[in-house]
Image (spheres, grey):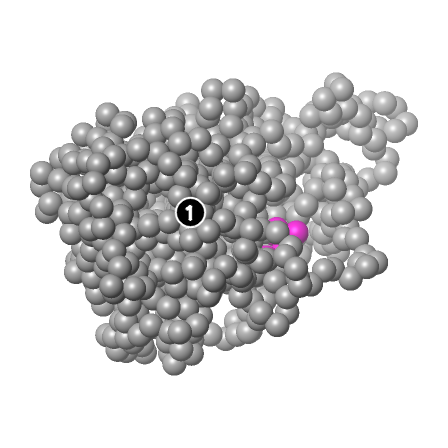
Amino acid sequence: MESTNDTGGCPVMHNGSGADEPSAGTPATNREWWPSSLDIEILDQNAQDVGPWNGEFDYAEAFQELDYQALKEDIKDVMTTSKDWWPADYGHYGPFFIRMAWHSAGTYRTTDGRGGAAGGRQRLAPLNSWPDNANLDKARRLLWPVKQKYGRKISWADLMVLAGNVAMESMGFKTFGFGGGREDDYKPDGSIDWGPEDEMETWDRFDENDELEGRLGATVMGLIYVNPEGPEGQPDPEWSAQRIRQSFSRMAMNDEETAALIAGGHTFGKVHGADTDEHLDAEPEAASIEHQGLGWSNSYGSGKGADTITSGIEGPWTAEPTQWDMGYLDFLLDYEWEVHKGPGGAWQWRPKDDELKGVVPDAHDASATVDPMMLTTDVALKRDPDYREIIERFRDDPDAYEDAFARAWFKLIHRDMGPKERYLGPEVPDEDLIWQDPVPDVDHALIGDAEIAELKEAILDTDLSVSRLVKTAWASASTYRDSDKRGGANGARIRLKPHRTWEANEPYELSRTLSVLERIQQDFNDARDDDVRVSLADLIVLGGAAAIEQAAADAGYDVTVPFHPGRTDATQEQTDVEAFAQLEPKADGFRNYIADDPGENWKPEEFLIDKADLLDLTPAETTALVGGMRALDATHEQADGYGVFTDRPETLTNDYFVNLLDMDYKWEPVSDSKEVFEVKDRDTGEVAWNATRVDLIFGSNSRLRALSQVYGAADGEEKFVHDFVDAWTKVMTLDRFDLE
């Protein structure tokens, strides 16, 4: 958490002397010309591979060829080989690498699952130039010889967080384990909203109740969590504790995990504020070309080592900054601390008496000693009664403390990876953790083609409509978030709390549908004299497939919706209710649904694009799915048929596109809010259909209209049917990592 906001401005994110400026006359982009136009470009990243491999590289396969232990030894060697161009504090880069790993993973937020260590996005803007990441460009350069040696067998994303693990182990701490499998991105994730501010280290993201608004995880633009000086630059520990609790909870950490992370992390290393930030040049993205991606050039003294400026805060926390011990808790709890401004001009805390004077060796001069310090965020743990109770318990029970930190750290660096089956490597822990959303292993033979046909027939013989079956399958599968690989149909959690009560899922009708499907499941399983069984999770998805095949047949198309059995049914005990509550759809344009309070001040069509991105959909897949859901009358009961532009509902036709594009109709808003529209015959004025903004955007937005015209053409229906089936199958299998 190295950063400061002493002036209210940005201490490091500025164009310093020598920074290259954009060329005059650079043409404006479409977004600059028409900023109010719906931005669907974030969906392009789901269709494009901008990396160097052209889809011909399997990272998991390459990782398995890695000499994992040799890699760890090479990382250790780097950590204890100090370089003159960036000298190691105390001769050990371990704390530096821990900060790099923490700040790579710590961008994760539960609200939308975005951020985190996956992608290795700390290498890219804006993260590479955030004030909180100042000088971490050097940490990655120190690791380059290791990355260069092992090449594509280890991603930057894995390497950066593994380096943090290895660092802790080299300093006497036993980690909980490590799972690889994070692939590298080669372009920033354009879907992530980092905040509303247009200046770094500002904080225009709190409501009148001091609650963090929106989906944001950090309290300050350009920082990972909170300002270490204190909220809004004020050294107020009690207020700081409130901000810490808000920010860390959005990273899926409870009070105990938060306290363990702060205390454990601050057991290692020091912060750097030899002088004020006036000596710093531009950040990497603004630095001159000759700096080759390095930023924050420092004109103070040597510009490195003892003269390093990162945050404006200076000093170590403990007497042995490269050793795991109880020093942090002992110092914090046993001594009184007073606030003052350090040499970097930032608020920090020093011991009130002389007992701790000179107890810490200097980081670069073996003949010198220094005093320890604390941040406002450290003193917050002591002042807040709930945090204090936790850290006092930790001090009384060092083993419990070590275990809590190990588990919290493991959670921090793996929280965005999804289920454990995605983890690679020899250090994956055997223990199933509830935040990994475990599902039972398959313990029976799977249904084959004959059984699938039998079950489809049984489903279609019930009174469940095509619409109802499609809506149930969609509600089950579309909870998936590609951002953190959570949710989806596997586990059949739609029948458990909290999913079964969500308004978006029409709880009453859902309960009735599940009862029918459960009866089919029981009858089928009870009738078998072999080991073949079907899970409810599979049956829900199969019901959607059967309904779509029937709807396609009614339109004159013989299609088979691909189906892959193998899902299992999770228990309520395997379901983290609080964490899963974050997945509740407050808006789902595919179902034409939006809650009374969706949580964001967005237009309905913007919610649609956000949902489509979380489902890893392209613009074309999004268009096909919306058109198909409308044709199948699979909209939410709230919508009351809005968008169903057809006289043949539950038939898989391209009527939605045909009628949307028909110039015999005109569209009129029913109120000034322009949320709901009547689709009228131009000649008679008769209302043909009703629509929402989500419906009309496929005719209004130029890119979406171009796609709609493909599907609405006289020869477009067959393509539409097949594209819908392909997109539907993709959504149904997004969480089937076992199929990869």
Q: Secondary structure at mark 1?
A: loop
What residue is shown at x 54% (from left), y 47% (from top)? 11
Estimate how packed mark 1 is, as few (under 14), some (14 to 19) or many (20 or more) residues with alpha carbons within 10 Å: some
Q: Quadrant of the C terminus?
A: bottom left
Q: Dividing the picture into quarters, in which one does residue 34 lie?
A: top right
Magenta stretch mostly in which secondary structure? helix
Residue 332 percent across, percent down from the top left: 22, 38
What residue is shown at x 26% (from left), y 48% (from top)? 371
Q: Dividing the picture into quarters, in which one does residue 147 lie?
A: bottom left
Q: Is residue 286 visible?
A: yes
Q: Farthest residue in the bottom direction?
A: 149
Residue 575 percent across, percent down from the top left: 28, 38
Q: Dividing the picture into quarters, in which one does residue 665 lie?
A: top right
Q: Is residue 470 visible?
A: no
**Considering only vertical position in the picture, is 63 above or below 132?**
below
Q: Please name whichever residue, 697 or 7, is drawn nearer the observer in this view of the structure.
A: 7
Residue 579 percent across, percent down from the top left: 34, 37
Query: Residue beneath label 1, please?
Result: 343
What residue is shown at x 23% (from left), y 50% (from top)? 358
Q: Is residue 570 magenta?
A: no
Q: What number of labels is visible?
A: 1
Q: Please name whichever residue, 15 or 189, is drawn nearer the observer in this view of the structure.
A: 15
Please report the bounds of the magenta region as a residue range: 41-47
Q: Amino acid at mark 1?
A: Pro
